[in-house]
Amino acid sequence: MIARLRGLAFRRHAARLGTSRRSLGRLALAGLTLAGLAAGGLSARTAQAETVRFWYHVDNPENPMTALVQKFQAAHPGITIQAENVPWNSYYDNLYTALVGGNAPDAAMVKLFAQPRLVEMEALEPLDARIAQWPGKADLLDNLLKLNAGPNGRQYYLPVQYVVLYLYYRADLLQAAGLQPPRTCDEFRAAAKALTQAPDRYGFGFRGGKGGWDQWGSFVFSRGASLTKGGLTSPQAVTANQWLLDMFQKDKSIPPSAPNDGFQEIIGAFKSGRTAMTIHHIGSANDLVAALGDKVSAVPVPNCDGKAWTSYGDESLAIFSASRVKDAAWKWISFLAEGENNAAFIKATGQLPVTKSASANWTGHPKRFVDTTVSSLPFAAVLPQNSATADFVNTEWQTAMQQALTGRITSQQMMTQLEQPFR
């Protein structure tokens, strides 16, 4: 229709000029030439570099992203990567705000806890077909895609690194106190009390601020608590939570700063000797060894009443459904999950590679921490895939834990408060 209207207007314009049939033909030819030039210009603009906005978070000052971007862009001259390192403490707040405001990146690093909320928001682009056709799929470690599957069974995440939490301990301080690394929760609590020499040293560096739910889970989920209706308010769950609160309030084997302590605080205190034990993953191993050498070692988190629970920590990549450059975004995120690129990326993040090729001869961490990670895998777990879990991890746990540690609410009140979204 548009073409017919253009032709009619062209002929009327020619008639007004008093043109002959031959002149009309010449004008038509000129019009086609101009149209061709316009189409060529559009094609040229289309062929210009597509820009992929990518969000990630890396605390290590030796950030590999610039080199990876340069390598990728050299291999894909039609794609420009704008990589933005967003601080962890505000990462998901910023991401949700950007998604709601229509200013989200095209792709980003994401964690499992956020997946249910993002799926509910219809913010994620399904990756099933792309992954199925991707040559790199065969190199991914077994079960990683299964662990990262969405709540509806679809694949929205592409794994890029993983960890499992375990117990770090100061070997020098335990040896001086005549203690062995704790294997049970009773041994752990006794060791924490014995190692405490307040105000100079405390037995356990507890992360009571943002991100500390997985430390808490080792002592509470292992004793039967769960993120389900009745799963946090059972007598066993409330007692398990009180057990940990008592370490802070009665034993005083946890630093007074715990209600506000985040990652930097617990690691800094452990390095300085202000705490003798803490829980984190292999991502901290190299930094701790650089500071402490053989004075630092690790064992799996202690088992409580015969059962252990630890958090499988993921970091994956996703493309957002609103992106206008999905093909380019896929090329970028799949590049980060392949062989040597994956290995280069995680050398800065300190986690473990997701590929078989990079894992085969991995020398990125001292063997004792790799062995502890592997021996913890049998009881590693992920939280339920639903939107209530996202709130629990991102905001609710931290608020309730701080209130309970400081005595503003009881253990029962804390667990009732946390369970409410799961009913």
Image (tube, helix red, strand yellow):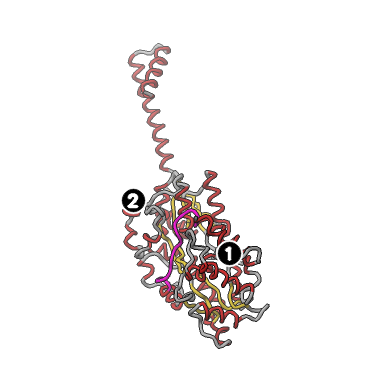
Tell which circle, 1 or 2, labels the residue nearer the N-terminal end: 2
Q: Is residue 177 magenta?
A: no
Q: Amino acid at mark 1?
A: Gln
Where is residue 59 shown, x and y percent of the image?
Answer: 55, 64
Which residue is under mark 1? 412
Which residue is under mark 2? 129
Q: Magenta region: which residues?
A: 376-389
Spatial CA distance of label 1 from label 2 is 46 Å
> In this image, 240 relative to 134: left or right?
right
Image point (35%, 67%), residue name: 357
Residue 74 appears in the figure: no
Q: Nearer the viewer, residue 81 or 400?
A: 400
Position of 169 relative to 64 (above/below): below
**Circles 1 and 2 in contact, beta carbons < 8 Å:** no
Where is residue 60 shown, x and y percent of the image?
Answer: 54, 65
Pick out the residue farthest to the front: 235
Mark 2 crowdedness (10 Å alpha carbons): few <14, some 14-19, many ≥20: few
Image point (55%, 80%), residue name: 170
Q: Element type at marker 1?
A: helix
Q: Element type at marker 2?
A: helix
Position of 265 relative to 125 (above/below): below
Q: Amino acid at mark 2?
A: Ala
> In this image, 43 relative to 229: left or right?
left
Where is residue 165 shown, x and y percent of the image?
Answer: 48, 70
Where is residue 131 shown, x and y percent of the image?
Answer: 35, 54
| Residue 377, disc | none
